[in-house]
Amino acid sequence: MSKPLAESEDQSFEHIQAFFDTTRGQLTIGEIPPIRRAALAAVGKKVRVALVCRENERVTDLLHRLNAALGKAAKENIVIDEVLPEIKRRR
């Protein structure tokens, strides 16, 4: 018998789940002008991870990259920011 969808999907986003379980943080997916599509994980005003959506990248792929980046950020106690360098590059 297969697992219910919710149970099997939980394991693929373990770092996102841990982020919600251990912080009062929020995830945002959408526009951060001038960047059309991005994903942001922050606690208050402190960004933990900010990713720029790649050309032709699907939302599910972006979420998997966000999950991996949150795991790395937590393990190494670092900030991963693709957004600020991209904004500076476009100026």
Image (cartoon, helix red, strand yellow):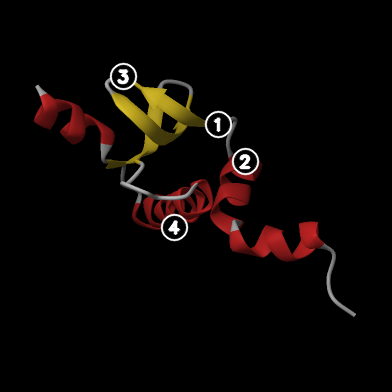
Q: Position of residue 22 (x, y in %)?
A: 60, 42
> Which label belongs to residue 68?
4
Looking at the image, do the residues carrying marks 1 and 2 touch, with CB atoms under 8 Å apart?
Answer: yes
| Element type at mark 3 | loop
Helix, strand or loop at disc 2?
helix
The image quarter containing residue 91 is: top left
Give amino acid for label 3: Pro
- Give the CA separation, mark 3 to mark 1: 21 Å
N-terminal of the two: label 3 or label 1?
A: 1
Q: Please tell me whether mark 4 sits on a helix, a strand or a loop.
A: helix
Alpha carbon separation for disc pair 1 and 2 = 6 Å
Residue 79, given in percent of the width and then of the height, sits at: 31, 42
Q: Residues within 10 Å of mark 3 (few under 14, many from 20)?
A: few
Residue at x 90%, y 80% (from the top left corner) = 1
First in sequence: mark 4 vs mark 3: 3
Answer with mark 4 or mark 2, whichever residue precedes in sequence: 2
Looking at the image, do the residues carrying marks 4 and 2 touch, with CB atoms under 8 Å apart?
Answer: no
* Mark 2, residue position: 20
Query: Which numbered disc covers residue 33?
Result: 3
- Asked if residue 26 is positioned above or below residue 64 in the image, the reply reads above
